[in-house]
Amino acid sequence: MSTSIPRRGLAMAELLIAGAGPQALALSCQLLQKRPQWRRHLRVVDPTGAWMVRWQRQMQAYEIPWLRSPSPHHPHPNPHALRRYAQDQQRMRELEGPYGLPHTGLFADFCRGVVQEFQLAERVQAASVAQIQLGPARPASLQVTLSDGALIQPRRLVLATGMGEPVLPSWVTRIASPYPAEALQHSQTLDLATCHGLLAQHILIVGAGLTSAHLALGALRRGAQVTMLCRRTLRSRPFDADPGWLGPKYLKAFHAEACWRRRHRQVVAARDGGSITPLLAAQLDQMRRRGRLQLHEQGQVQSACWQVGGWQVDCLDGCRHRADRLWLATGHRQGVSQHPLLRQLLDQKPIELINDFPVLTSDLRWPGTNVHLMGGLSALQLGPAARNLFGGLEAAKRIARAAVKA
Ligand SMILES: Cc1cc2nc3c(=O)[nH]c(=O)nc-3n(C[C@H](O)[C@H](O)[C@H](O)COP(=O)(O)OP(=O)(O)OC[C@H]3O[C@@H](n4cnc5c(N)ncnc54)[C@H](O)[C@@H]3O)c2cc1C
Ligand SMILES: NC(=O)c1ccc[n+]([C@@H]2O[C@H](COP(=O)([O-])OP(=O)(O)OC[C@H]3O[C@@H](n4cnc5c(N)ncnc54)[C@H](OP(=O)(O)O)[C@@H]3O)[C@@H](O)[C@H]2O)c1
């Protein structure tokens, strides 16, 4: 284990949560609703030092007007709380369409209210979990080192650290020619507001998920010419997966499935890669008909080369694109091997993995430890919506129940 972090005095905590995104907020609220007296034993650490900073940043960076998920999906334990808030604030117009998709601003204001209601504003410490050391007992005792060198011995640790590592296609690593940093970016580092000089530029966007659609529309609004390159076809669906996965319709059979491999196949099949909403599909189609957007389906990059101030991109089907900028909207890869803290855990307490996904206990613990996982990596227990707000609520209920019972 690395020794580069300066060690400081040892502190105790009932529960330590790594991450202050919507999933961590959902868990904190569930816990405090059951045990308000636990507030002083709860510690939350996140390098941003505040609640939901990453969430808010990504919504602003891609200029997302409203969420993809319906109004009952949010961090408050009461599913009606967001709708009630919109009513009280006379902001019902900010719940969009038949599912009441919350506008980004409404959702942010509501979440700020949730933080206030549960008196959580001062709970986030600006640090990250850097190391986890397991003791010999069963379940293993825990010693956690923070990025500032502080040592904590929590009774329980919850990793709610979000979406994993950006997917960089293999051709990116084969680019031999030097190019300016802003000429090739993954969506994770893109912010439309700071992309200057897009007028009349040609942007090639790789990927067919909702991020690619928002980035395409943002570039088009700034006068760019856009090509979307999808390795399959651009698929339109209201949600990431069929809404049957947000309730017993499909989850009942999923939970009854004893074979982890079959569960994993169901998760992958239910999401079936990236998709965009019907509304964005219609907006993109309009742009295509106006000649501003080109859609290249069944297209995969073979190689890219930066020459005389622009990209030349050759595809496997023989197509050649020229572009000023390449934007990768290729999503994030989740897996134990992608997560530095989980690699540490695996070294100390090896467990069964299915295609890099951990087989957790039903209360989302890494077996033999008191480390719980939230987010996409709990998908073998929670199903395809594990990484979404819906999954955050399900995970929060299971972990809070286990913590209170213990
Ligand atoms: C653009 C975009 C829009 C989305 N819209 C929706 C939507 O409308 N509805 C929906 O249900 N889902 C949506 N999603 C899916 C989304 O990822 C989740 O809903 C949500 O962000 C997951 O919350 P989280 O708390 O797991 O992760 P995050 O919001 O990513 O929060 C994780 C936090 O962990 C912190 N962290 C990381 N490592 C450490 C560490 N070692 N120690 C301490 N802290 C750490 C990070 O700083 C971050 O603040 C969207 C995703 C994207 C990318
Ligand atoms: N609230 C909102 O409005 C909003 C906005 C943005 C995102 N989101 C949510 O955020 C989550 C992530 O969305 P996302 O669009 O960032 O990621 P995503 O849904 O995972 O989509 C990634 C896309 O990149 C493609 N891809 C991956 N690797 C590739 C490679 N090597 N070469 C070529 N293409 C590759 C995938 O192709 P395949 O399809 O073939 O796998 C997919 O089309 C989703 O849950 C989404 O609903 C919500």
Image (cartoon, rainbow, N blue to C red):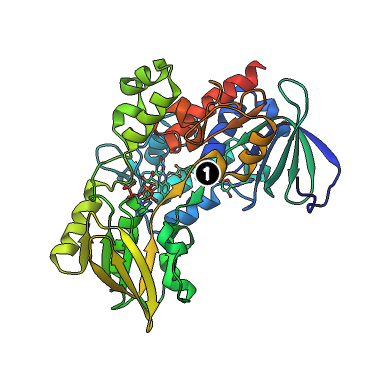
Residue 224 in sight here: no
The residue under the point 40% across, 34% down is 385
Q: Quadrant of residue 240?
A: top left
Foreground residue among 367 and 306: 306
Q: Quadrant of residue 318?
A: bottom left
Q: Quadrant of the N terminus?
A: top right
Q: Furthest residue to the bottom?
A: 308
Q: Amino acid at mark 1?
A: Gly
Assess mark 1: CB under 8 A from ligand 1?
Answer: yes
Disc 1: which residue: 162
Above or below: residue 387 compared with residue 62: above
Q: Quadrant of residue 314?
A: bottom left
Foreground residue among 362 and 103: 362
Q: Quadrant of the C terminus?
A: top right
Q: Is residue 123 left or right of residue 29?
A: right
Q: Is residue 54 left or right of residue 17?
A: left
Q: Position of residue 372 (x, y in %)?
A: 60, 30
Q: Position of residue 343 (x, y in %)?
A: 63, 40
The residue under the point 45% across, 38% down is 387
Q: Is residue 377 left or right of residue 143?
A: left
Q: Furthest residue to the left?
A: 289
Above or below: residue 373 compared with residue 206: above
Residue 243 in sight here: yes
